[in-house]
Amino acid sequence: MQLVVTEKPSVAQAIARVIGAGERKDGYMEGNGYIVSWCIGHLVELAQPDAYSDTWKKWSYESLPMIPEEWQTEVKSDTAAQYKVLKGLMHDARVDSVVCATDAGREGELIFRLVYDQAGCGKPIKRLWISSMEESAIREGFENLLPGSDYDNLYHSALCRQRADWLVGLNGTRLFTVLYGGKVLKVGRVQTPTLAMLVEREEKIRNFKKEPYYMAHILMDGVDAATERIDDKAQAEGIAAACKGKAVAVVSVTKEKKTIQPPKLYDLTTLQRDANRLFGFTAKQTLEYTQSLYEKKLVTYPRTDSQYLSDDMEDTARGVIGAIYKAVLFEEPSGAEPNVKRVMDSKKVTDHHAIIPTMEIAKADLSAVPETEMKILSLAANRLLCATGEKHEYETVKAEFRCNETVFTVSGKSVTENGWKDFEAAFRRSYKTVEDKEKEEKKLPELAEGMTFEGVQTKVSEHFTQPPKHFTEDSLLSAMERAGAEDMGDEVERKGLGTPATRADVIEKLVKDGFVKREKKQMIPTEDGVKLITVLPDVVKSPKLTADWENALTLVAKGEYSMQEFMGGIEDMVKELVQTYNSISDEQKSMFGGGAQESLGKCPKCGGDVVKGKFGAYCKNKCGMNVSRAMGAALTDSQVKSMLDGKKTLVKGLKGKKGSYDAYLIPEGIEDYSYNKDGKEVKGTQYKVRLEFPKKKK
């Protein structure tokens, strides 16, 4: 039998239906020579520092750098039951090979291999690699399973990414948190340089000084021609006054025919950018909606960085275009034959081709698709029509007038062939999108060199220089994609920060950690975000360096760069970081609210200082000891002090089965605790107490 392992239960069900594994069991399905089971995202993850040594349990400068000699992994507690099912199936005597059917990409490979290794499985691996959840794609994929060893380099690249994030993130975060002694200062291999770009833009906006400038205009027969920028208002007014009522001649007319080629198909980043610009969706929302459509078999695989289809997909593309006219857009076909060959290029398809709808849209009940997902489906459908449409053609006209040796210019534009923009206009009409209207140039009346206009009117207009614009998620995703590109040659495999699949999570982390805030569509760094980038060294915030790493990871995936070389470079950087940054001034320590915090006592777990924080008392070593609560009750500062001193402490309003009560808590050491919240295990340490009840008054 073959054991098929997918990334999600919904994908397992879809595959099981196609290959005939119809018998439901606990945590898997079986039938027709197959067992189909699933992960729930990452079942196995890298172990936390605490698992390696007691020294690494404590947040201190002396414990850095943390570089494991042998990397350890651990099963995630909230999904341990499903891991147990998979481990059992991998060792089932009936199973002779395992099919890796997780998402066909770097992270999907990692999710499967970590479980396979943790379970100690040694059975042969085969790889299912598909770009669509359609039945025909799944069948074809199973007919062409590849040896798992073909993807060893992809797995090595994924391991490098995971371990590099651990090394840079945990060492950097602990180093700067310990140095500055305030809030946790999170450092990330991709998120820190992304924050640096936001902060740099914010600084430019804050330091921008608005400057006025002026333009003199001549007005005649519906034509408004203007000078270049003039900084002096009096000079502009003088030019306008000197031309008022005069005759003005046309000295030149330049006409130029121009073409805008159809856009490329969507990869994930361009889809996220358009969805943000047109609908205000965050990058994470767009990924979630597209993933859901993929699992419903309505679009192809979302986590792609290609904007082309492979050369063998011409019939598929033509079929999908026909299905779009029937299902998604209710406008009649334009009559022009779609140019499908323009969107096909196998050399530009890496792991997956561009995102397009599937033939399933012709059969599916689209009225049952949520509105948000329908917007994404319509975007992908419309982009396929645009990309295979006719080119957009227009003519520009630039006319120059001369009056008293001053040149005035006016430009206009007339569309000669709307082409693919007909589809774009139809889409915007149907969705009334929120995108800003672009400034339309008017069509000019017929002008010719030597024409004169008598008695022209004049005016002066005032303008102001504009500051750089705040990033939106659209422009931030674009900046992340291009980061470091200007310093890299064209031969570089992958440029930018992160991958199409990870950029959304990076942005969300920055918001969640309080370093970036969303204001409408704008992404603005908070004061703490600005301070963090101010204190961090270039080595952890340089977009160029991180872009270099991302390119190196791609080379590891291709077998052109070794895992050892990549990890050696990361380890050297972390060691150097810790050696270089070993102390800061008292003034710097107070930047994030550290420094002069009132000490309430010593932590009973690690001996660190317990200080008064914004949300209650906490141990500065972040050792996991819950010093601010006991028996479920929040303690006041004086009660915390008393408990830390080992004294009998009266706490009122404790909750019990029969209501609330008062009791003296007598600390008798500490104990570990754990509980599940929102599907995740919460662990920590708390006071171990003995209760003594106050004597009731007679």
Image: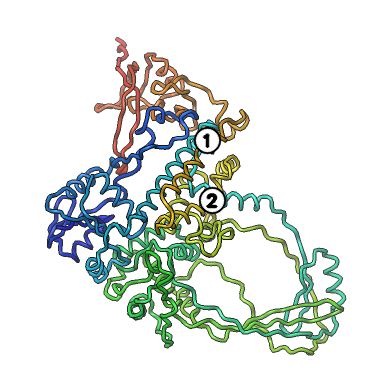
The residue drawn where x is 66% and y is 57% is 467
| Secondary element at image label 2 | helix
Counting from the top left corner in percent of width and height, residue 458 is at 80, 76
Counting from the top left corner in percent of width and height, residue 105 is at 35, 59
Does the rendering let one see residue 664? Answer: no
| Secondary element at image label 1 | helix
Disc 2 packing (10 Å; few <14; some 14–19; many ≥20) = many
Counting from the top left corner in percent of width and height, residue 8 is at 27, 55
Looking at numbered disc 1 in the image, what kind of residue is underneath it?
Answer: Val
Q: Would residue 557 appear left or right of 242 to someone viewing this image?
A: left
In the rendered structure, find residue 355 and report the number of the disc placed on it.
Answer: none
* Placement of 576 over or under 211, stated as above or below: above
Colour mapping used in the image: rainbow
In the rendered structure, find residue 545 and report the number of the disc placed on it.
Answer: 2
* Placement of 529 over or under 636, stated as above or below: below
Spatial CA span between label 2 and label 1: 18 Å
Query: What residue sits right under mark 1 in the picture?
Result: 578
Q: Would residue 33 appear left or right of 676 to someone viewing this image?
A: left
